[in-house]
Amino acid sequence: MSHEQLKLELEHLPVRLLHALAKGRVQRHFRLGKRRLIEFFLSLPEDQINTIQLELQRILNVEQTRKELRHNLQAQRKTLKSLSLPTTSQFTRYPSDGKTSVSLTLEDVLEGIGIPEPTDFVPDSWQIEAVEHLAHSDVIVSAPTGSGKTYVAIEAIKQAMIANQTVIYTSPLKALSNTKFMEFSQIFGSQQVGILTGDRRDNAHAPLLIMTTEILRNLFYDAASGEIDLRLHTLGLVILDESQYLADPERGVVWEETIILCPGQARLLLLSASIGNPQELSQWLASIRPLPCHLIRHTKRSVPLRGLYLQANGPLVPLFQTQSITQGKGFTFHPDAKRLLSEYESKYLGRR
Amino acid sequence: MAPAIHPCELVEVLRRHHLTPAIIFLTSRRACDDALEAFTHEPPALSQERGETIRTFLETFSKDFPSIENHPLIPVVQAYGVAAHHAGHLPSWKIAIEELMRHGYLDAVFATTTLAAGVDFPARTVVVTQSSIRKSQDFTDLTISEIQQLAGRGGRRGKDLVGFVVITPSPYIDLHVLAKGLTGFPEPINSQFVVSYPMVLNLLKAHSLDQIEGLLAKSFAQFQLNQRAEIHQDNLDTIHSQLKPYGPRECADWITQWKVFDLARRRKSHRRPPMETDTPFVKACLPFLTPGRVVGVSKGRALILRQYRSRGTFTPMISVLKSKGTIGECHASSVTDVYDHIIEFQPLRGFPWVSPPTLTQLTQAITQLPARLPTVPILTQAPQTEETLLNDVLTDEFACPTCPSHPACKKDYAMASRLRIKSQQLEKTIQALKDGLWHQFQHKADILHKFGYLTSTYQLTQDGEWARLIRIDHSLLITELIRMDAFSGGAPELLAGVMASICHDDDRPGSYVRLSTGLSSMLSQVRTVADSLGAYESPPLLRADVAGLAEQWIGQPQSGWTALVRSTSMAEGDVYRLLARTLEFLSQLHGLRHTHPGLADSAHQAMEIMRREVLQELP
Ligand SMILES: Nc1ncnc2c1ncn2[C@@H]1O[C@H](COP(=O)(O)OP(=O)(O)O)[C@@H](O)[C@H]1O
């Protein structure tokens, strides 16, 4: 491979990978820009260039596989898992302990920004697991916002509808009820979806009913005293969205009442944002409900999150020393962010 | 005040780095509105084409939601691709913004942090400008869960390869709180179970007491309490095992025996405190013998100037001003009457205990006292029984000093008694954890019995039967008002006005709204009732201005939404929420149609009139 080719190839690489290549070869490589890095690589003696070429080949292979995998979503998760471990450790590892003096650049943090290529919808394994377990147990799903809990709800509703059961879906806020009402009406057809609020009933005989949790609790009160006006005997599934509201100082008690009073024949599906003690919740359910309770705890965000820092008249800089924000690993602020903040504080707030 | 970043600069930077669409969380509604306003001083940022897309979208949207037609913010949204989203807006407008965001038509939305939980739209980037929020008057740090709830909106699955959280400093920010929130694990959640009146009534309607005890035991609250109790139980078990070697000796319960012995011995060895010499009558009098009190002494009336104890014998003494104007000292025991009359004055440290001019005034005041003065009844307490018991014990033949295990007990007592006190405390704690909820229930049930909603055996009375259908906040106040017939014959708008002021618990400043004299007098009546119930249910704010708003909306069915909103300084969204909640409360009254047809009918009429324009757009 000629120098010219190598140069071209190197120029195609994102800086992140160039830095990975330079690690251990160039002192203080993080100070160098893309162009100077490439110049440096090319100025190396022939034998070192060869090893660089070998490594470059590996990097390209890995990148290639990743690309292919994106097209082949089905295989993606399994293979990436086994692949990404060695690759990240060899090439793209950033100091997570902050002891090394290597700093991320803004480009590193912004790298990969963009829109994914459209793919067929393939449910995650935890989503499938949740739906399957509903067949024979109550289910609690604790997953970060935006990871796809609604999919679980929709599939569960479909199953229950096929079995001719009534489904009740509750949300903590009227506004959310309205949004879900519109969303579900589009999916299941407006004939199939009803909504109950404090003062109104729309299509109350539909198989899928949306309401706030307070309304459901009131229905259970009435059912217990024999004043059933809804088909509670056909009730097959109760979905409590945003169940972390159980801990709301004022309204949390309503979630407990609803769960306690929920008829035994109906399955419970609790959808919750990430909480600290889902297993405790699940043990509780298991202890008071006729069926076992299956807990699905999904902690990984589906879209990686990265931190940035920006202040008035200042540059946009990375927030942390790591590219992505991960849970439970602690944090180290990026030196730039730290410096800017202390400037800001001493300038405006008189803090040191 | 330290400057936060200018909203236009912020959005510009985000655009430049392809970080849009973004949700920018700000501290207040005001901040969101100001941010939008700031854009209007800039040249339009969106291309004609994008502006057109937004316009078309909103046009279609307003077919379903006429209330957003001609919304004053439309031009800003169209020209700059930014919007505000907070509780001050109508729900329909918020839905429109959410939809625009979902379609990717907007670059940035300014939203309040408090609403993060109620927002159902994600973006590529979230911008966080604060680390604490106002919770009931105070600023508290955001919890890890709350921060992750905010950050969770960054990065849309299927639309973004990566999501971002941008932190910009402001005076409200502590970077460490945010960093911890972003990288930590969310807090565990805890039960917030409380027993409410409607809960008691509704449970008693359908279940026996035993069943209810079982239902309460099923709560997450009890589950968590039991877990705590278990920890205590483990401790208790350890202590019990430690107590084993201190088992029965000469006497079965030697620890108690020894305690009595020990106490008695100590009492005896101490010099009896001089207080003990006070007779019960004097003891009971003493609290009343304060400066300014008029008392009767052997030679007529006197005014107490100070109370003290004699140095030597420690007997209680008083300095008094006699009606002749002389100052004297006497034993507290020589007081014959304590009158229910006090003459206020400014006491001094040294003799004559008041300033000379006051002395003359006081002397006059004493001579001018009416001939008959009421006396303070003095209740003397019976001498304490425990003491006599102890004394008896000591004089009786008390086994301990002669007991063969005396030395062993003496050695072990300190440890053993400490352990036993601990074990008793733990037992109490465990019992309290196990019974807590049931006691709460009984307490509430007793109150309901007192008011006549329950019989003494916790059966629902006739009033209880219908009262259980009122399942909203301030239920006791509402049912009491109904029992007093407070609403009888009232026009629908009065009923709605009162319900509005009961249901509205927001203390944001409102504005003066004219309300009819009928409603005004009704409100003051409601306030009296609410205050009298204060011990059993915290009273609502009962704002007159919101009552007036509801009255206006129902009393003038021809007038429109715009006119209503213009008549108050409350935000549109707040007015909407007020009326929506009033509707909910009214519908509970409507539920009483079998027992209170007149009231239910009135509520129904009010509801029918209320549901117009914006108020019927959404279910
Ligand atoms: N398995 C999946 N693959 C790709 N996208 C998904 C998958 N599951 C869900 N999504 C998408 O993720 C987004 C967020 O889902 P949502 O159910 O609203 O999150 P949550 O309710 O957990 O906050 C939706 O746009 C949804 O279409």
Image (spheres, coloured by chain):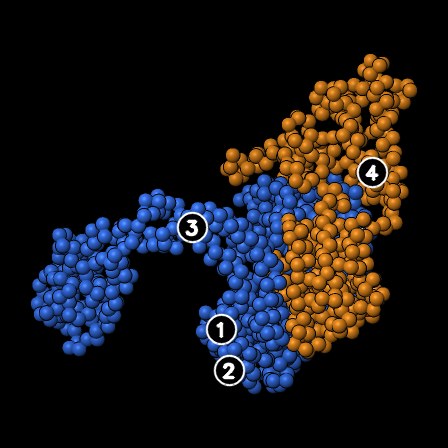
Chain colours: A orange, B blue
- Mark 3 lies on residue: B247
Spot occupied by residue A154 in the image (x, y as percentages of width and height):
80, 59
Q: Are marks 2 and 3 in contact (CB under 8 Å)?
A: no
* Front residue of B186 and B206: B206
Quadrant assignment for the C terminus of chain B? bottom right
Q: Is residue A183 above or below residue A98?
A: below
Q: Residues within 10 Å of mark 3 (few under 14, many from 20)?
A: few
Chain that bears disc 2: B
- Mark 4 lies on residue: A80
Mark 1 vs 3, N-terminal side: 3
Chain that bears disc 3: B
- Mark 2 lies on residue: B484
Q: Residues within 10 Å of mark 1 (few under 14, many from 20)?
A: some
Q: Nearer the viewer, mark 1 or mark 3?
A: 3
* Front residue of A6 and B37: A6
Mark 1 is on which residue type? Ile
- Mark 1 lies on residue: B447
* Front residue of A292 and A107: A292
Instruction: Look at 11% across and 60% down and name the residue there.
Output: B329
Spot occupied by residue A117 in the image (x, y as percentages of width and height):
86, 44
Secondary structure beneath label 3 = loop
